[in-house]
Image (cartoon, rainbow, N blue to C red):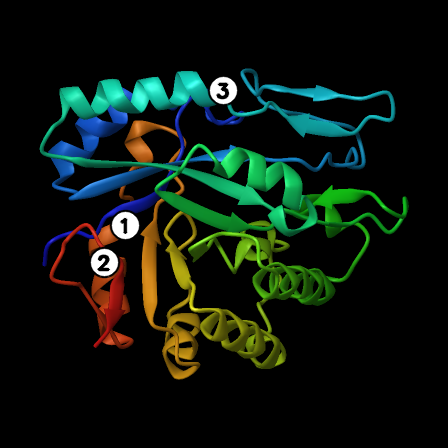
Amino acid sequence: MSLPADDHVHSRFSWDAFAGDMEGTCRRAVDLGLPAVSFTEHVDFEAWSAPPGGWRWPEGVRGTIDGHGRFLGAPLEVEAYVAEVARCRDLFPALTIRTGIELDAGHRYPQEVADLLRTGFDRVVGSVHALADLADPGQFLEVSSAFAQRTAVDVVLAYLEQVREMVASDVRFEVLGHVDYPLRHWPAGLEVPWPELEEPLRHTLSVLAASGRALEVNTSLPLDLRIVRWWCEAGGDAVAFGSDAHSPGELGQRFREVARAVESAGFRPADDPTALWGRA
């Protein structure tokens, strides 16, 4: 089986991808035999409240902290980013290299999003990374910090509510990123209560299917196969594969095994190897 395109990749132009060398990532893509990569750089308009104990970002993370302790990731340097993509396209002519952004909660910032999208990105991934801060109304906490204010199940339910709100909006994005994002931060030793989460997940997938957008199979924490099956049963037309790589070595991680699993759940490659997978 040939590998699918990696449609969720970060380079140094994302505020948290300090090891994201774009040229090195493209070289890695060629070595792996990937048909395409999409550099979907972080775009955040929403500041996050400080977690309990304060911020502990790794060295190299770029952003600002305001007088209230809220963090906002550094903005995308669009001109420099587009120039670097063009340079890599010249270096790797056999590799399809797409421009893109990972747009966080874009439905709450329609004017800012409209201004940015005039650049004409090839791929827009819509995602949610934060929930309402229960201790500071009107503010937001990154999902990993939200477990201090809610039960684990309530974190997932609140997250999916935010996802549905974004999907139901008219903000432009083609692919929903990491619908299972809270599971990355799931409390150690606590079993995921799938029976309790099935209905809200199925509801969210149905809303996504009705929007005509694709579901991302994010392989940083492999998407549980039952979610892919539910996506197929909801009438979802397409899936994208995304490693969420923040360095060249993470590119295409677990793609071969995950692609086989996704195929068993009802999806198959398109005739164009750079395209999204469709229903079998």
Name the spot of residue 91 as percent of width and height, x first.
Answer: 15, 20
Q: Secondary structure at mark 3?
A: loop
Tell me which amino acid carries mark 2. Glu
Is 108 or 73 nearer to us in this picture? 108
Give the amino acid type for the residue marked by disc 3 in the picture. Glu
Q: Give the residue drawn at x 53%, y 78%.
A: 202
CB under 8 Å between discs 3 and 1: no
The secondary structure type at the circle numbered 1 is: loop
Q: Is residue 213 visible?
A: yes
Q: CA distance from mark 2 to mark 1?
A: 6 Å
Task: Give x and y (percent) for residue 106.
Answer: 61, 47
Query: Distance between the Cα atoms at labels 3 and 1?
Result: 30 Å
- Is residue 167 left or right of 69 when viewed as pictured? left
Residue behind mark 3: 77
Point out residue 206 in the picture as x, y percentages from the top left corner.
51, 77
Q: Which labelled disc corresponds to residue 61? A: none
Q: Is residue 121 above or below residue 67?
A: below
The residue tagged with tag 2: helix, strand or loop?
helix
Q: Quadrant of the C terminus?
A: bottom left
How far apart, in angstroms, are the residues tagged by discs 3 and 2?
A: 35 Å
Q: Which residue is mark 1?
A: 254
- Residue neighbourhood size for the residue with mark 1, other residues' Cα within 10 Å, grouped as few (<14), some (14–19), many (≥20): some
Residue at image position (73%, 34%) is 47
Q: Work out whether mark 3 precedes mark 1 in sequence or the reverse, and give the earlier one.
A: 3
Q: Residue at x 26, y 22 (%)?
A: 86
| 145 left or right, relative to 138 | left
Tell me the crowding category of disc 2: few under 14, some 14 to 19, or many 20 or more residues within 10 angstroms, Cα based.
Answer: few
Please report the residue visible at 37 percent of the width from the left and 45 percent of the height from the top: 123
Circle 3 crowding by C-alpha within 10 Å: few under 14, some 14–19, many from 20: few
CB-based contact (under 8 Å), mark 2 and mark 1: yes
Give the residue number, with chain letter if any, for mark 2. 257
Asked whether the viewer can see residue 21, the reply is no
